[in-house]
Amino acid sequence: MCGIVGAVAERNITAILVEGLKRLEYRGYDSAGVAVYTNDQKLERLRRPGKVSELELALAEDSLIGRLGIAHTRWATHGAPCERNAHPHFSGDLAVVHNGIIENHDALREQLTALGYVFTSDTDTEVIAHLLNHKLKDLHDLTAALKATVKELHGAYGLAVISGQQPDRLVAARSGSPLVIGLGLGENFLASDQLALRQVTDRFMYLEEGDIAEIRRDSVHIWDVNGQAVERESVQYRDGTEAAEKGEYRHFMLKEIHEQPSVVQRTLEGRLSQNQVLVQAFGPQAAELFAKVRNVQIVACGTSYHAGMVARYWLEELAGIPCQVEVASEFRYRKVVVQPDTLFVTISQSGETADTLAALRNAKELGFLASLAICNVGISSLVRESDLTLLTQAGREIGVASTKAFTTQLVGLLLLTLSLGQVRGTLAKGVEATLVEELRRLPTRLGEALAMDSTVEKIAELFAEKNHTLFLGRGAQFPVAMEGALKLKEISYIHAEAYPAGELKHGPLALVDNDMPVVTVAPNNELLEKLKSNLQEVRARGGELIVFADVKAGMTNGEGTHVVQMPHIHNTLSPILYTIPLQLLSYYVAVLKGTDVDQPRNLAKSVTVE
Ligand code: F6R
């Protein structure tokens, strides 16, 4: 999960490459580099550890001017994040940038070392540079050399290559890592994500799995996985809403938290009739397929997995459909027994998460009834490879910690639950109409929860000096507690664990003392009284309690107990609402701790490697 940008033009392209990298930092940001075929007809590069801004500073001192170039922002997999491991990697007169993992790099390194190639980095990518150089010596054509090289690579790659021997082109290959060509007038570009190129064009051509591309100033040629020349459709985008701007907010994360009422509204648009969910929202064959569904298997990673866990409560309770939920990295390597007529559901913000994609590909061999992707990116691999799709309308999420993607996924999953229940006739009378009404009110309720921003900011002060936290929830609030704990650890680096509140006395209670704040979500539901008893157990051990409680739950502040009153909401929708204060809490704790909120250490936005 690195970011790639490339350009071939009649003007100096260095600033375009750097701007593209900045827009791709969500993919990785531990080092960055650029290689340019300069106007002095030399291939030169500059690389720096750290963020793209470090590279930019270096370029201000030591400029590179040219009309052909490639650039990269890295998230380290092989080799520490330092200058010599940063991309582009050189071999002779060529430069390579790579997103992905080459699994047979050890064997290739051995072969290439025996042939006299000298390695200067610890990366898997450098084998590609030397192998290409080796092929180029025989074939004398960069495109042909790339075609021959990829035949020997095992693993995942998005690749961009330039060579001083053929400075009229940029060549690229895609297998397992996304690449898009940006089409200009007398100039063309390449990137891992169109976002990087919106500054220079609004016309894009998406490479498909196995494609090789030869990109010149005035032409693009593509060959498919079988080596056949192919045309890929070009798509024009006019929507400017993707602009990566923070606006009035200090961080993207805060902006994205506050966007939730509007993106939830957008996710509902066109999907509800007066008192029903429109099943066609999932695709033209959805009604026919949903009628056959007897089980649901959900697979996802991280925050998206937590959304799946909430959906399990809904699917079993409301639609009476047995549901299993599993993290993709486990599912893909496990021998799975598939029940007949099981719908395979993936959930993903990016639609490019390697484990989720691999799980989907495995699932296709396992006899599932059909696959459905609940995804935020319409042009993603996950969407392209699934039978049915529901696009969440969260808009681009830039903050590495997922916020609005999660709540829109929950909305999508509730629509799925109601659709399955509707088609199969398993919903209790009146449930669908009630929940459709509640869904319409949800954006307003979310706005009310967001209005508690400054209350939560004050509560955050309780955490500034703490190193450990517990999050508790019962029922569908347990995954909400897990999501709250994940957010806190991701951006504030405070150790946080989530437990179903009833599990406390089976072990974790031993950890509780006055240095361990305990955060709880307490909607007014049938588990409230049991939850209150669990909280007593914490107080009795001196643990400080922070409770987000329904205004009707009858909970008030007391010694060591901080209660934040939440707007009342229908119990089914409470996981969506209670997510908001937990997001705000982690945000304000991170701000107090002075961490890099939008780009927390060691993480990347889009995890396209295993
Ligand atoms: C956490 C977070 C990650 C992602 C996970 C899956 O804030 O963002 O846990 O949820 O990497 O990513 P997607 O949803 O793109 O498949």
Image (tube, rainbow, N blue to C red):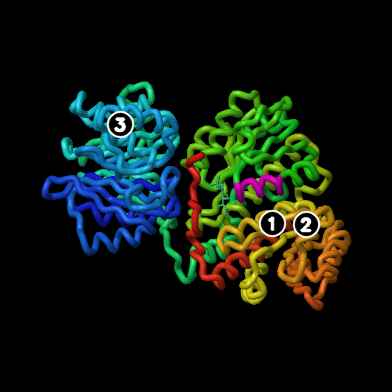
Residue 342 appears in the figure? yes
User: Going 72% across and 38% down the picture, which residue do you hit?
Assistant: 324
**Which mark, by number, is residue 508?**
2
Left or right side of 434 for 261 = left
The answer to which of marks 3 and 2 sits earlier in the sequence is 3
Q: Position of residue 373 (x, y in %)?
A: 58, 39
User: Going 40% across and 33% down the picture, which residue do you hit?
Assistant: 105
**Label 3: few (<14), some (14–19) or many (≥20) C-alpha neighbours in 10 Å:** some
Viewer-closest of 429 and 575: 575
Q: Main secondary structure of the magenta part?
A: helix
Viewer-closest of 360 and 88: 88
Find out whether the residues at labels 2 and 1 contact each other: C-beta distance under 8 Å.
yes
Magenta stretch: includes residue 305: yes
**Label 1 amino acid?**
Glu
Q: In this picture, which residue range is highlighted in magenta?
A: 302-311
For label 3, the SS is helix
Instruction: State the residue position of label 1.
Output: 497
Find out whether the residues at labels 3 and 2 contact each other: C-beta distance under 8 Å.
no
Q: Which quadrant holds residue 227?
A: top left
**Label 2: few (<14), some (14–19) or many (≥20) C-alpha neighbours in 10 Å:** few
Vertical relation: 154 (above or below) 505: above
**Which mark, by number, is residue 510?**
none
**Which mark, by number, is residue 113?**
3
**Label 3 amino acid?**
Thr
